[in-house]
Image: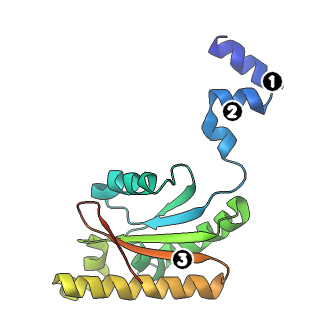
Amino acid sequence: MSRREAFGLIALGGGVGLLSTLAPGVARARGHTDMLLLTCMDYRLTDDTVAYMDGRGLRDKYDHVVLAGASLGALTDKYPSWGEAFWSHLDVAISLHAIHKVMVLDHRDCGAYKVILGADAIATPELELAAHTKELQALRAEIKRRHEHLEVELGLMSLDGKVETIA
């Protein structure tokens, strides 16, 4: 069947079954997913983030929100619209996709942390870990305050793609 014939069948009511064979992602758009993932916008880690999620068996099983600074971006008073966007996306993910978990994945050498907190706040690996831990835990507490039923997982990705779990 040609693409033209297939689209004709779809247009004539050929059904979601045919549509799902032509565009599987369309069929998956309805229903639920496992979680919402919040990450930073840093282009250096896009592929590593996808590989990490795929490695955990989560391909096509999460919604993805991207904010500069990830946890910090969701809570900063410096750019309040970022937090508003995160909370709106979270509410939509809950109502539309029935998520039950939020994963927040910050990363090392984050430019947003330098811009918002200042370079001195993350000048050493220890200070950097402490800053990320503080922001990640603060966001987890706020998510739990607003949506106590949600699980929250926290991680810090290194520039080599390895993820450290934050308690």
Res. 20 mark = 2
* Residue 144 visible, this orientation: yes
Characterize the local packing of mark 1: few (<14), some (14-19) or many (20 or more) Cα atoms within 10 angstroms: few
Label 1, label 3: how many angstroms apart (C-alpha)?
Answer: 41 Å
User: Label for residue 14?
Assistant: 1
Write down the residue under mark 3: 152
* 120 to 39, vertically: above or below: below
Q: Is residue 82 left or right of residue 10?
A: left
Relative image position of residue 7 (x, y in whole percent): 70, 20
Query: What amino acid is labelled 1 in the image?
Result: Gly
* Residue at 46 percent of width and 57 percent of height: 56
Horizontal and vertical percent position of residue 18: 73, 26
**Can residue 85 be seen from the camera position used here?**
no
Cα distance between the residues tagged 3 and 2: 32 Å
Residue shown at 38%/69% (left/top)? 68
Q: Amino acid at mark 2?
A: Ser
Residue projecting furthest to the left: 124
Q: Position of residue 139 (x, y in %)?
A: 49, 83
